[in-house]
Structures are given as structure tokens and as C-alpha cells.
Image (spheres, rainbow, N blue to C red):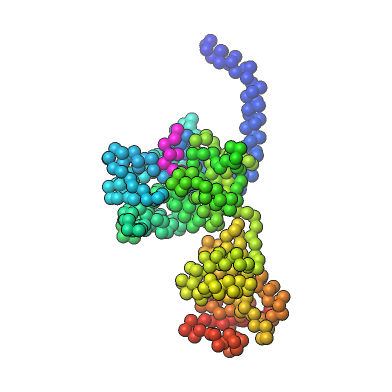
Amino acid sequence: MNSSNQKTNDCLPSSSDCLQATSDYVRSFRNSSPYINAHRGRTFVVLLDGHGIQHPNFANIINDLALLNSLGVRLVLAYGARPQIMERLERRRLALEYVGARPVITTDVMEAVKDAAGSAGIDIQSRLSMGLPNSPMHGASLRVATGNMITARPVGVIDGKDFGHTGQVRKVDCGAINRQLGDGAIVLLPPLGFSPTGEVFSLSVEEVATRAAIELKADKLIVFSEAQGLLDEAGDVIRVMPPREAGRRLESLDETTTDYAALHAAWQTSRFGVNRAHLISYQQDGALIEELFTRNGGGTMITQELYEQVRDATIEDVGGILELIRPLEEQGVLVRRSRERLENEIDLFTVVELDGMMIGCAALYPFAEDGIGELACVAVHSQYQGGHRGDLILQHIEKRANRIGLERLFVLTTHTAHWFRERGFEPADVDALPRARQELYNWQRNSKVFVKTL
């Protein structure tokens, strides 16, 4: 009885503090509501390496992931197991060889990799399955899905060195992942990949997370690492950084370090369509919540600049255009162009640039005496197709054509006839081409001709 009275009396002097704490909580909760609405239904890929799984804060991270799931966020968790693998190799008296930043996975080492990855995955699933009363997970009833959702291929032999079971991501089964996410499950992606021949390969968790975020067209990649984020010269956390600056920061880092791997994953996804990538610390309790539900965040966000440039090309763009069109040339979609030819014709090109990266191009070859121009070398980077970039390029080309007095455009295509038909181009015969262009027509390619009146 006395102890009960004592407890009550001890609480009385702190009642004002309790009221203040409640007021602060209510204010914080209200301020977070716009973010709750913004994140609902979005797809987030989370990268958590093996060090994060071993850290004492791991339980809090799991609780925060459960909270995100309950708020309607579609979660994909790619996890690593490097320290767990090293522990097993040490117990088995096995050594792991590295060539640069890439490990050589022998058959014996692969057994340790499977053991460690499987154990880490089970640990994560067991934590996500907890529902004890008086715990943050009480009543969560989370479902977890995992499996062979990553198809991999072997790295193979490089400079005479056989990398054994070291693999690279070949394909992400986005359909299977999206079905599980649609059913409300959290999807786990282990650092393992499977081949159609039944082989298992060891993968980098950073590559798994990066490819998953890009191919799923995720809204965010969230990278847990040791550091709170990127620091400036004064030691303060840099809150926002464009991909171009992140790329420069990478050049100063050792590519064998975990800092490099974390930043490279964020930088890579931000260049290929993921709007935002976040670097936060697995050591800090609540880092995930602070980053996602407060205005200032707590870590570093890598985000694309908010503009795209559609402009006339310059000689500095030659390298970027060559890199852009090379895959289409190899597929036979575009006619091959040498660097010398491209340098001579660069004034005819229009380009789309996003944060220093060339993501689209096209050329206008005028036949002034006939009042017509050829639209050629139309290309949009594979990661940026399906949007409006092609239309922006076409609008820019049509404006250029009007400025120089052209009345019509024609295009020769073997693969994208429907796209041009939808934009006002009409089928025509080879005879409709200017005589000079008829003489250069390649009958073996048998390209279809389309003409548009401006």
C-alpha cells in the first residue's frame, strides 16, 4: 500500500512534464500526417546488410518496418550476410579470396554462404512474426514472402580467374514481387540468385537492392549503413545531394569499403528512375521514422534534380550519344554511326539530358530543296522509356524544322512504326523520299517510310 502511494506521489511533481510530452507527441503526429498519406501505397526497397542484422538496434528496425507496413507502404527488404558468412568460414577454417571488390565463391564457401543467408532470413522472418502483448509488434499479423525471385548468372572467368559461384543479377521477377506486395506481404530478398539450370549463386546485397528498386520502379531506396549519412567538411550531415555530386564523392572512396557500396547503390538507383534514395544509420534508433516522417529527415537523401533539358547537342555530347545508341545499334534497331561521323553531324542532333546523363537523342537531316527533313537516330534510354521523352524530342525536332523552313518530316523505321503513326506520321512509298535519300535507301533493311506534314 505504501509503495503504491509512493508511486502516485512521485508522479505528481512531473505532471507538467507529462502534459508537455503529450503535447509534443500530438504535434509530431499531426506534422507526420502528410507523409503518412504520401507514403501509402508506395513501393520502398530497403537495403539492410549483415552488420545491421547483428546490431542491437536490429529489433527496433524491424518494429519500424512493421509500422511502415501497417501504414500501407509496400516493402521489399533486401538483406545481406557478409559478417555472418565470415564467422562460418572462420569456424570451418576456410579463407575467402577477393579479386578487387569481388569475392571468389568456391563450392565449400558457397555452403557457408547458403547457411548464413538462410539463417539471417529465418531470423528476420521470426522477428517479423512476433506479436507479444506490450510490444510494438502486438497485433501486427504481418505476412512475409520470399523465394526464387532473383534470377542470376555466373560472373564466370575474368582474366583467367574462375569466380565459381559468384553471381550477377540477371532478372528480377517483378510480377511475383508485386503480387505479394499487393496482398500486403513484406517481400524478403536474400543475397542469393537462382539459375534456370538449378544453380545457386552468391550475390551482392547492394546489387540485389539496386536492381530490384530500378526494375520495380520503386519510389524509394532506403540504405541502412553504419554512418548516419554523408558528411560535409564541418562534419555535419548533408541532407540533400544530387546524383552528380554523389558520383564525384564516389571517386574519392575505396570501392572495397561498405561506405562505397552503400553510396554506389543510392547513386545508381537515383540515375535510373528511382526518385529518391536515402542513406541512414542502422545504429540510430528511429532513423527510418525520422527520415521518412519529418521535414528535415535524419540522413542523406540522393535525389534527381527537378529538371530535364531538351536542347541542341554540342561536341561534348558525342560520348553520351554513342553510349546511348550503342545497344540499339547492336540490336539492329539503328544504323551504326562512327564517332567521326557523329562528330561531323553533331549540329544536327537534339538531346535530352537529366542530371548530366544522356537519356534521349534524335537527329534532323534537312533536304532544303525538297522542303523536307529526315528524323533519324531516335533513341530513349531503356530505363526512361514509357514516359514523355520521345514526345519532347519530336516537338524539339519539329520546331527546328519549322525554323529552317521545312514543311514535312519523314522517318525510316523497322521497329517503331506504331509510335510514329500515333504521332501523325502517315505510311508512304520509297518514291516519296527526296531523290538523294532514295539513292541511299537500304533495301536489305527494308525500312518502312512514314511522312508527316508540319
User: Can see residue 282?
Assistant: yes
Which quadrant of the rendered structure holds the C terminus?
bottom right
The region drawn magenta spans: 46-56
User: Closer to the camera, 35 or 260?
Assistant: 260
Task: Decide: is 145 above or below 372.
Answer: above
Residue 414 coordinates in the image, percent (x, y): 51, 78
Q: Is residue 117 magenta?
A: no
The structure residue drawn at horizontal position 43% and vertical position 39%, both measured from the top left corner, is 51
The number of numbered discs placed on residues in the rendered structure image is 0
The structure residue drawn at horizontal position 35% and vertical position 53%, both measured from the top left corner, is 166
Left or right? Give the position of 145 relative to 312. left
User: Closer to the camera, 271 or 424?
Assistant: 271
Which corner quadrant of the image does residue 170 belong to?
bottom left
The structure residue drawn at horizontal position 58% and vertical position 50%, both measured from the top left corner, is 245
Residue 57 coordinates in the image, percent (x, y): 47, 34
User: Can see residue 292?
Assistant: no
Return the residue found at the far top.
Answer: 2
User: Closer to the camera, 360 or 196?
Assistant: 360
Residue 260 coordinates in the image, percent (x, y): 48, 46
Task: Decide: is 360 above or below 451.
Answer: above
The structure residue drawn at horizontal position 55% and vertical position 64%, both measured from the top left corner, is 320
Left or right? Give the position of 253 relative to 436. left
Which corner quadrant of the image does residue 231 belong to?
top right
Task: Decide: is 227 above or below 444.
Answer: above
User: Closer to the camera, 196 or 355?
Assistant: 355
Task: Decide: is 83 above or below 152.
Answer: above
